[in-house]
Amino acid sequence: MPRTTLFHESLLDTHLVVDVRTPLEFEEDRLPAALNVPLLTNEERVEIGTIYKQVGPREARRRGLELTAHRFPAMVAEIAAHAAGRPILVYCWRGGLRSKTVASILDLTGHDAVQLTGGYKAFRQVVTEYFEPFRPPAPLVVLHGMTGIGKTTFLLRLAAAGHSTVDLEGLASHRGSAFGELGLSQTLSQKRFETLLWDTFHRLPPERPIIVEGESRRIGRMTLPGNLYEVMRESVKIWCTASVETRVGRLIEEYGLPEYRDGMTAALLRIRKKLGGDSYEELAGHLERWEMGPFMEGLIRGYYDKLYYKTREWTEDATIALEDFDAAQRELERFLATGGCRNAGMS
């Protein structure tokens, strides 16, 4: 019998984490930094499941042995090479036969391996409970502002300068607007998004404020888990500003690429009803002629500024101009250094 262990975050730093589920299961979601060494292929897992239901567990196990026994030496060699002397944590869907088999073989061949009790299912419960209710490891500071102001760019600059940040749009692979999919592919699952978010939050130091960008409850197809959205609404709020001219320039820089043309046309068509017929035709004409300045300004005035932050049920704790990112960073740092989080009711 292999040794077993309950999940703890420290295992991710001390062990090589090995996922022995199928590639499809692994693609949907997995533990952070896990290595996929599947015991069964996608098709074989279906076959084994069918035999289990139609014939019985004994025949299913016999067939499983036929399919996998010849792979054991190569699997052990691959896992050992990646472990490089580290202990090994092996898991499958719910801590069943697949992870037990691989952990046993590793143990028999002299490797320090343990099986994760409850498997991925147990880890998934940890992630779910982390956000219900969500208690951030440090106070949240939320950047709000109109589309095109440069909040994401500012957030990334803050991260590069050593601030604790969480890039919700980056993790979701979506910019959170009607044109948010341009140049991105939001193929990840909701479970995967939540795991990435959990991993990001739990690795941040507890003593520094965490800066995030204000988002709606949904980012493309992804939904903020648990009560994270409500916590953000109650957190420190920074209202970011910039001129329309600056916003137009930044939107052109981000979206005004010829390879995005078809995607922009499709996105514009999706918001046709909200724009109204005349506005849509005008913007479509600018897009067809590739007149990016009038097109982006028309989107700002006729769509974004009418739809987003039309009314705010809260008062910001500070206002920062993002015309100059360096100056904005200094201003935000002064706000944080003078106890802005505490003054806003955070601890």
Image: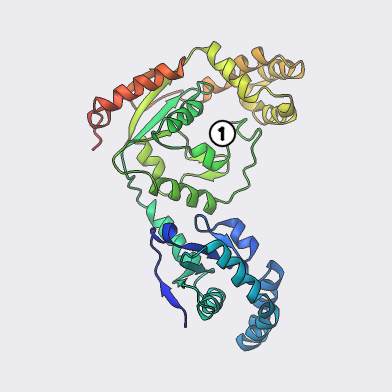
**Is residue 44 visible from the viewing direction of this image?**
yes
Q: How many marks?
A: 1
Q: Which residue is mark 1?
A: 175
Residue 201: image location, x then y, percent: 40, 46
Indicate the quadrant where residue 55 lies.
bottom right
Decide: is 67 above or below 127: below
Say which residue appears at 35% left-offset and 41% top-offset.
231
Q: Secondary structure at mark 1?
A: loop
Q: Residue furthest right?
A: 288
Residue 78: image location, x then y, percent: 61, 66
Decide: is 251 above or below 347: above
How dense is the environment of label 1, judged by Cα within 10 Å: few (below 14), some, or many (20 and up)?
A: many
Residue 136: image location, x then y, percent: 34, 44
In the rendered view of the protein, which quadrant contains the C terminus?
top left
Decide: is 7 above or below 98: above
Q: Is residue 19 left or right of residue 43?
A: left
Q: Is residue 121 left or right of residue 57?
A: left
Say which residue appears at 44% left-offset and 50% top-offset.
199
Indicate the quadrant where residue 166 lies.
top left
